[in-house]
Image (cartoon, rainbow, N blue to C red):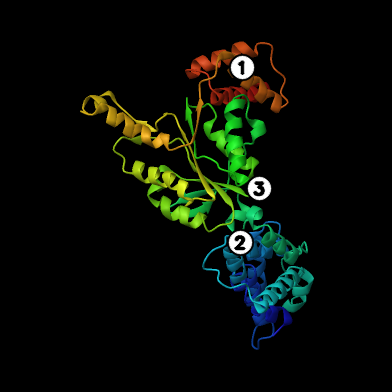
Amino acid sequence: MSDLLKKINSLTIFKNVRNSEPLKSLALFLEKVDATGVTPAELVRLYSDFVYTLYDRRPDGDLAAAIWDAVIENDNPYLKHTIKLYLDDASAKQEISRLMAISFEKELDILTELGSVTYIDLERMVFYDGYVPQFKSSGINIKDRYLEVIANLGKAGFGIYANHLMLRIKDGDILPVVYPDPITVHDLISYDRHRRMVIDNTQAFISGKPAQDALLYGDPGTGKSSTVKAVARMFAPDGLRLVELPKQEIDNLADVIDKLSRVPLKFILFLDDVSFDANDDRIGSLKSVIEGSAGGARRNILVYATSNRRHMIRETLSDRHNDIHESDSIAEQMSLSDRFGLRVMFEQPTKEIYLEIVKGILRNKDFSEPDNLESLAEQYALRKGGRSARVAKQFTDILISRLT
């Protein structure tokens, strides 16, 4: 048995990494190198399978980077207990033993060494003079990187939280957003006062100060959702992650909060463009969760929601006329939005603000304004049925496309 295979098989704290790619395929190849009765053709196939798996995970073919990806994506006993200690979890009754700590560091040394294996090291084991696929290794110091992650769990995160700033809920599971909206605060034009309220509230949350769940409401296309996403990205280096919660997932909200509360990061649970019918059972679920923040059940989670409606509930005249206690009905409908401590209204922009947004977008794109810009922008807004930040963005996209 080769020394490389022995080192892979010795991984205990990082057993999950050993059983995941690319080490799993590498071990299968190494097992056959010294085995009797194995043909050169089979060795070539197993080696090629390993390189295929490597390229499938990393298009750059970087072995060290692929091993690092596996290390950061998988949990392990040392990490689990460290997180419990970090969160002051009552179940973490004992400190990490000296023996586990030694194993943890020794295995990180092994992983770093495995990441330094080169194409030439493996090629000589194949015993084949023809072409075999190559790979590279950037020589990442996996040990130093991972120790830095452990030391900064509250900002760096782990697993999907380390590699993804925006996540989503599907069937109660927390999944990464593969292609997140790249918007930043720099991209947002106007609405400075509104944005500052959200930034200040989020800053307080990150700093461990009292912060409020927030409802951003108002006219469509005014930048409510973009504000939330941009502010979340702004504080990502401080350990903030955005988790999008579709309305149909509200029934899973308690489980989602339970999962996130065990992660040593801060989260914005984001309900985008949400509204309810007056008799929707999910209203009660959402109200109870938001109310629960006062008891500390969501110490690392804020709820941010956007809606075109101030009270988040669709209402018709018949709803009021058919209700004997009209004032009670109105109070019930208002009770959901009242639970948001911070409410920010985004109104439709005036002509001046609309043009300011158009010009700001063009400046950000280093695009010279045409002489008839104001006339063109107004004509486009009329065709779209009104002014908004979204309409300004659509107009500038069309304008740049036509004039370049």
Q: Residues within 10 Å of mark 3 (few under 14, many from 20)?
A: some
Snapshot quadrant of residue 283: top left
Question: Answer yes or no: do the residues labelled 2 and 3 have beta carbons within 8 Å?
Answer: no
For residue 24, above or below residue 335: below
Horizontal placement of 368 versus 286: left or right? right
SS state under label 2: helix
Name the residue tied to disc 2. Answer: 86
| Mark-to-mark CA distance, 2 and 1 | 49 Å
State the image coordinates of residue 204 (x, y, percent, origin top left): 60, 41
Q: Which residue is mark 1?
A: 355
Can see residue 345?
yes
Quadrant containing the N terminus in the rendered view: bottom right
N-terminal of the pair, mark 2 or mark 1, is 2
Separation (CA) of disc 2 from disc 3: 16 Å
Query: What residue is shown at x 53% (from left), y 59% (from top)?
Result: 262
- Residue 63 lies, in percent from the top left, at 71, 65
Q: State the image coordinates of residue 159 (x, y, percent, origin top left).
A: 59, 59
Quarter of the image where one finds residue 143: bottom right
User: Dot 2: few (<14), some (14–19), or many (≥20) neighbours within 10 Å?
Assistant: some
Which residue bears the numbered disc 3?
238
Which residue does the image show at 61% across and 17% down from the upper left? 355
The residue lying toward the viewer, choosing from 361 and 36, is 361
Residue 205 percent coordinates (x, y) = 58, 44
- Judge left or right: residue 341 versus residue 209: left
Quarter of the figure that contains the C terminus: top right
Tell me the kind of residue under disc 3: Asp
Q: Is residue 134 visible?
A: no
